[in-house]
Amino acid sequence: MQQTLTPARVMRALAPLVWIGPAVVLIGVVVVWPVVVMIQSSFLRISRFGVVQGANGVDNYTKLFAEPDFDGIMVRSLLWVVAVVTITVVLSLGLAQLFNQRFPGRRLARWALIAPWAASVLMTAIIFKWMLDPEVGLINMILREIGVLDALGGADADPLGNAATAMPWLVFVAVFVSLPFTTYALLAGLSAIPPDVYEAARIDGASKPRIYWSITLPLLRPALIVAALINVMNVFNSFPIIWAMTHGQPGYSTATSTIFMYILKGSDIGESAAMSVVNFGMVIVLTVIFLRVTKWRTEVR
Amino acid sequence: MNKRLAGAVTLGLTAALVMTACGSETPAGESTAEGGRVTLKLVAADYGDGPTAENSGEKFWKGVVDEFQAANPGIKIEYQVINWNDIDKQVATMVQNGQVPDILQTGDYSGFVKDGLLYKSEEVLSSTTASDMLEKFAEFGKVDGVGYGIPFVSSARALFYNKDLFDKAGVAEPPKTWDELKAAAGKLKAAGVSQPFGLPLGNEEAQAESFLWFMGNGGGYKDASGNWAIDSPANVETFTYLKGLVSAGLTTPNPGTKNRKDVWADFAAGKVGMVNGGPMSIPIFEKGGLSNFGVAPIPGKAGPLETTLGVEDWIMAFNKNGHKEEIKKFFDFFYGGTAAQKISDTYKLLPVTKSGIEKLGSDEKLKPFLDALPNATFYPFQDPKWSEVNTQIKQTIGGAVDGDPKEILGAIQKVATSD
């Protein structure tokens, strides 16, 4: 068959462009363009009032890296991602398994699991902040009732006032809001595993843990990787939970890089842009490392 | 054929999408004259309790704008009210994108002056309005002797104390010195008050609370000759005293994470013995159900403060779009009419004009604050470094009641003196 360059052929070759065109334009305008502006801004000197005062070379970056709190914030951001994602995935594996069983009221239970997802993250975070209020917080009042707390209003009743006790609560809330999505992604993965594979395993006399380890987990891997990866990016960029509950305080001791970037915006927009660029780079690096480690391309054997 | 038609339609849609995207990039702040009508864009901070509240800034400005437009049919005003937490960042974005408003009302003006973005006050104020401004306030609106910031409202601070809790604890009088304060707080604590002294050093307004304490020891952000002195021995001593109060459990727990709004709410709920507040906190306390409170001068190390923190907010006019005459008309209307008075009534903020202060002279509750105004001390907001220092204070100064005061204050001093 000879290929001739007729107008009809050209049109056909270009046809896909028409279909993906709007998406490409949209991505260009709302994703690529802001990234370009962000990188540009990080090399500009911009006053706190928004006046661009010219080029600033790499000074914004030098200033950022010299911030006394910078190292602690970056380490904390990494720990935050690892802790939240690990706990979320492990709990979700169990929950997905549970919701994949048949039991009375399963439909209701599945609906209930959506609740934290349906509520706005900011609202959830504010509600937890209120429940932990030293004077009138519900959680503190319950702790007082059961005798764990001596009195309301003091430092003991103020877990969010201290980094050592605030971080576990922040992680808890982050896990709480991440569970529904992760569980549903894994649940979808579970129901896609054909039942005859299990039947074959049972006939071969495999034990339950063995079946889970050798059949369920490998077949679940694509869903698991996608769920974990989306969580890594979401949690790394997570802003509302920490902002609503602690503002990164006391000092910067509960701030992650995203929170730090926002605080910097109040004093030095250029430095804040530099922090955004570093943040952006971190997400890409984390994603690449994650994909390497999980060998996402390799087929299940 | 059908496919091609669909393709053409999609292309058309795409093009339309791109065009609208470009179309919406016309600066919203750029005023356009439609049929001889000039549009002024006004951006203002919200002094109320949010967009849905009875006292929201939206409602206040709608009232002002409606009345002004009825009297001046040739001028249309588009107003946008932004809450205090976001207004600085949003205005910075507007400036960066070249979409400046014509009139801006917020807490700071000095940063716009250097780049020549503002009209001088004399260009947009009629002589009647200008001469009604209190000189002291107008003075703070000047950079190198030229006025740019126009005083909008002011406020002063004093000590509020809960009379019922004082009676219960057997404290006869509000404290005048730091020693008396500590003794009174100890008695309140013994009487079961969980927060004897409300100490908000969280990011909302740590710069105000710290300043009030610095003043009590003859300190401040700057020394007498105008150099930054945040880690001066007097200031370190102040925070060492506060640290003692905190570790004895006589204050709000973990002050570095607590905001003024929450501590005031706790005071209104009767959980706090004493707290620094202003006239604007009176409606908050009363709404919370507390009416039996007293107002006293803020205690200092050796005696009550002779000065207090004065807060002054600003309104300013940007020169980018022209419209000098229309802005002047609006300012005359605002200060000459009932609008300025309405702010004081709604939000218990203090006026900045001589006529306004005269009108309020008879208000018993506002009297202590009006009396304090002439002697008030202000933030060093004429210093271009102030905004950066301010951000650092808000985030970190609370740590000085926890860790080493000298170290924490020293870190802030370093930000102030770096170039």
Image (tube, grey):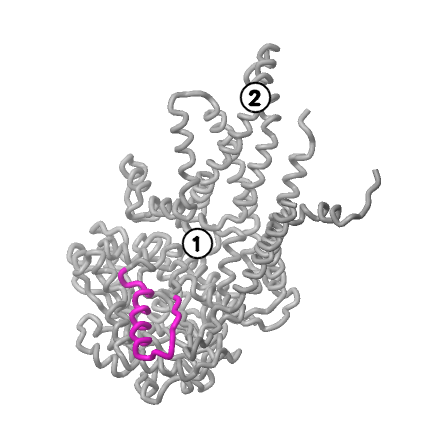
Image quadrant in which you'd find residue B96: bottom right
Residue hosting label 2? A212
Q: Amino acid at mark 1?
A: His
Q: How many neighbours does mark 2 have within 10 angstroms: few (below 14), some (14-19), or many (20 or more)?
A: some
Q: Position of residue B261 (x, y in %)?
A: 32, 58
Q: Chain of mark 1?
A: A
Whether residue B106 is visible: no
Q: In which quadrant of the rendered image does the C terminus of chain A lie?
A: top right
> Is tag 1's residue or tag 2's residue first in the polypeptide sequence?
2
From which residue to which does the magenta span run?
Answer: B54-80
Residue B66: image x %, image y %?
31, 72
Residue B169 against residue A90 in the figure, above or below: below
Residue at the far front: name it: B1
Subunit under mark 2: A
Q: Quadrant of residue B183?
A: bottom left
Farthest residue to the right: give it.
Answer: A2
Q: Quadrant of residue B87?
A: bottom left
In this picture, is A159 found above or below B241? above
User: Is B258 rendered above or below residue B101?
Assistant: above
Taking the image as shown, residue A274 lies to the left or right of residue B307, namely right
Does residue A44 lie above or below A277 as drawn? Answer: below
Residue at image mark 1: A247
Magenta span includes B34: no
Residue B69 covered by magenta stretch: yes
Please identify the quadrant where the N terminus of chain A is shown: top right
SS at circle 2: helix
- For the residues labelled 1 and 2, the Cα–Cα distance comes to 42 Å
Tag 2: amino acid = Tyr
Instruction: Classify residue A128 as left or right of residue A14.
Output: left
Residue B55 coordinates in the image, percent (x, y): 28, 63
Mark 1: few/some/many CA within 10 Å (<14, 14-19, 20+): many
